[in-house]
Image (tube, grey):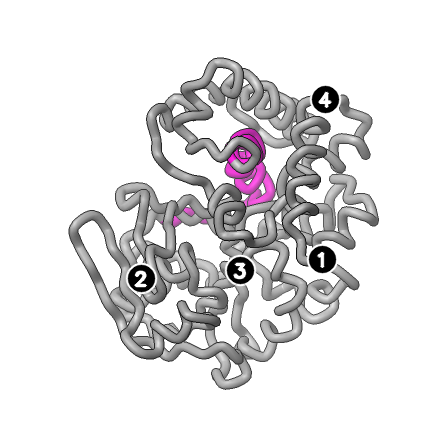
């Protein structure tokens, strides 16, 4: 299987190494010092005491690559619109594009009764570039659990070496032999692979932790374990999480009431979630496809979400303060 990982940073770099060692024909798109290091020295994945280095074609201009069976997109939400036009040419006529990203995607409300206000759609897909350039039949949603950081250019460290999972699904819930084949590659690469008929529900359940905890980490510069261990911050995270559960239930999703247990898994954890990593690195924050998307859907349904309103306003202001002037 010929696979392109578009955005071979922390998560994408991890996947690229795992797919390559599983026998896939892998190429990556990576820019800046990280991309230069991959071209010079290969891409290295650290898992505990193990180090695996692969040599894969790495470009900063995707036009230099051919067509692929699968393109796995792992860029951050704020960059997605700017790369929209580059994605379709990377696909073979029967290829699939897997969005292994956090957040509510632009197609989340398509074919459903889920309200997606125009302003939210515009933030998720500026100018409709993604909807216009990508055939909906080629899109595959993905809820991914995989903790990683770029330790230095060309080197990615897995912070969850024993916990890596990809839940895959077509937005319309239909079966797809090409998704089956990609899931088989994911399993061969040593990750847990699951196919679902309700990828929206899987994304919602995954995003609950991120929406509840990541903005607090970004605002306070606290690791996840520090938020979970602080009674006041934990109470704030739980309030946001319960609002997302109530909202998800109203949308028809089966949402488990397990927020206390899931938070407890991170007690004492030194992990810096991606939003805090972005604050520390001065990168744009993923708020439009996260807490603000949940907030806007709630408002469209007439649901009161006071915690999402308050935390969302604060982290949105933080994101604006970091934007280039």
Mark 4 vs mark 1, foreground winner is 1
| Dot 3 and dot 4 residues touching (CB under 8 Å) | no
Residue that badge 2 annotates: 155
Q: Which residue is at a point 53% across and 80% down the rendered structure image?
A: 61
Residue 325, label in figure: 1
Question: Between marks 4 and 2, how big is the CA–CA gap?
Answer: 41 Å
Residue that badge 4 annotates: 306
Q: Could you tell me which secondary element the residue under label 3 belongs to?
A: loop
Residue 246 quadrant: top right
Q: Could you tell me which secondary element the residue under label 4 belongs to?
A: helix
Question: Between marks 3 and 1, how big is the CA–CA gap?
Answer: 23 Å
The one nearer the camera, 141 or 292, is 292
Question: Between marks 3 and 2, how big is the CA–CA gap?
Answer: 17 Å
Q: Which residue is at a point 63% across and 28% down the rendered structure image?
A: 244
Question: Is residue 215 shown left or right of residue 15?
Answer: right
Q: Is residue 78 magenta?
A: no
Of callouts 1 and 2, the N-terminal one: 2
Residue 75, label in figure: 3
Q: Is residue 162 above or below residue 236?
A: below
Mark 3 Cα shell of 10 Å, populated few (<14), some (14-19), many (≥20)? many
Q: Which residues are magenta?
A: 193-217
């Amino acid at each position: 299987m010929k696979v392109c990982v578009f955005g071979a940073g922390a998560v994408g770099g991890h996947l690229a190494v795992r797919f390559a060692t599983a026998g896939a024909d892998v190429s990556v798109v990576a820019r800046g010092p990280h991309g230069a290091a991959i071209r010079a020295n290969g891409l290295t994945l650290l898992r505990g005491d193990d180090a695996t280095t692969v040599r894969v074609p790495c470009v900063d201009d995707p036009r230099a690559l051919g067509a692929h069976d699968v393109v796995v997109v792992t860029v951050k939400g704020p960059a997605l619109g700017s790369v929209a036009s580059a994605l379709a040419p990377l696909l073979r006529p029967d290829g699939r594009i897997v969005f292994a990203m956090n957040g509510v995607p632009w197609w989340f409300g398509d074919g459903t009764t889920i309200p997606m206000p125009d302003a939210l759609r515009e933030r998720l897909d500026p100018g409709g570039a993604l909807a216009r350039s990508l055939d909906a039949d080629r899109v595959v949603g993905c809820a991914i659990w995989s903790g990683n950081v770029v330790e230095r250019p060309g080197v990615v460290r897995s912070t969850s070496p024993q916990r890596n999972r990809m839940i895959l699904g077509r937005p319309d819930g239909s079966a797809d032999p090409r998704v089956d084949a990609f899931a088989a590659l994911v399993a061969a690469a040593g990750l847990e692979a699951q196919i679902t008929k309700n990828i929206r529900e899987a994304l919602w359940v995954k995003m609950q932790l991120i929406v509840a905890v990541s903005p607090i980490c970004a605002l306070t510069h606290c690791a996840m374990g520090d938020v979970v261990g602080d009674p006041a911050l934990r109470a704030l995270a739980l309030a946001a999480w319960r609002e997302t559960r109530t909202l998800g239930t109203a949308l028809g999703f089966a949402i488990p009431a397990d927020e206390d247990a899931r938070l407890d898994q991170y007690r004492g954890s030194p992990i810096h979630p991606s939003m805090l990593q972005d604050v520390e690195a001065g990168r744009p924050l993923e708020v439009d496809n996260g807490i603000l998307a949940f907030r806007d859907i709630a408002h469209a349904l007439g649901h009161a979400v006071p915690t999402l309103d308050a935390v969302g306003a604060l982290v949105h202001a933080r994101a604006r303060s970091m934007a280039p002037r």
